[in-house]
Amino acid sequence: MLKKFNLFHNILGIFFKNRPYDEKTVEIANQEYFVRGINLDDIKDLLSIEREVYAGELPWTKTAFLVELQSSDPHLYLLIQKEGKTIGFIGCRIFGKDAHITNVAVLTQNQGCGIGSFLIREVLDFARVNECEKVSLEVRISNKNAQRVYRQLDFVSNTIKPNYYTENKEDALEMILYLNEE
């Protein structure tokens, strides 16, 4: 009987922890935005944002997004829109007690007004619901603005990953936020 209860409890836990994201309208810096989970039809918009933010580069390909969005592992992929246009997105996947932000990007003209911070806080909430102990990400060594945002959200520097970015061999800084220390 205990095994049946544990199985039921595990299934119930998976149901609640992996429930779809509730789309919503939010206000950030006195502007109204719409946030929802990403679906396969959104990949074209994500690639367009990547091209603009990363100077024509595509850190993630269409195939990478397809694989990630269809993964059975716990994950959260969100986009944010202004007046029907996708202006940013974030992705996170969970491995055991660790949540990893796989990517976050906001169109250049929309940066600096709290959109990225909002998206990261949504991921932090997702990580807490999934009982994660930490959230990690990598950021280019040269991307001081992003590092500043992450530090404001209580991420700390962990390690440098040499030659992490394949297109230019730039190093990455791994940053971590320990959820049990908040």
Image (cartoon, grey):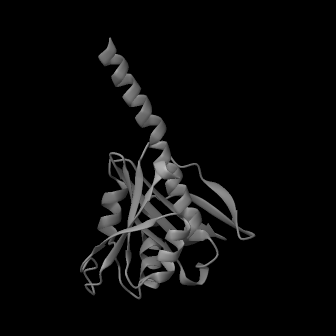
Q: Nearer the viewer, residue 148 or 119?
A: 148
The quarter of the displayed image where residue 113 is located: bottom right
In the rendered view, does 110 fall on the left or right side of 77? Answer: right
Please say if 49 is above or below 155.
Answer: below
Q: Position of residue 172 (x, y in %)?
A: 32, 76
The quarter of the displayed image where residue 29 is located: bottom right
In the rendered view, does 118 fall on the left or right side of 177? Answer: right
Q: Nearer the viewer, residue 172 or 168?
A: 172
Q: Position of residue 124 (x, y in %)?
A: 50, 54
Query: Which residue is rendered at x = 31% and y = 66% of the image?
Result: 64
Which quadrant: the N terminus? top left
Q: Position of residue 97 (x, y in %)?
A: 36, 46
Query: Which residue is rendered at x = 40% and y = 25% of the image?
Result: 9
Q: Position of residue 8 (x, y in %)?
A: 38, 23
Count of numbered circles on the image: 0
Q: Of all residues shown, which one is farthest toward the top?
A: 1
Q: Of all residues shown, which one is farthest toward the right?
A: 30
Q: Is residue 101 in view from this perspective?
A: no
Query: Which residue is rendered at x = 35% and y = 22% of the image?
Result: 6
Query: Which residue is rendered at x = 25% and y = 84% of the image?
Result: 169
Q: Is residue 78 in view from this perspective?
A: yes
Please say if 94 is above or below 118.
Answer: above
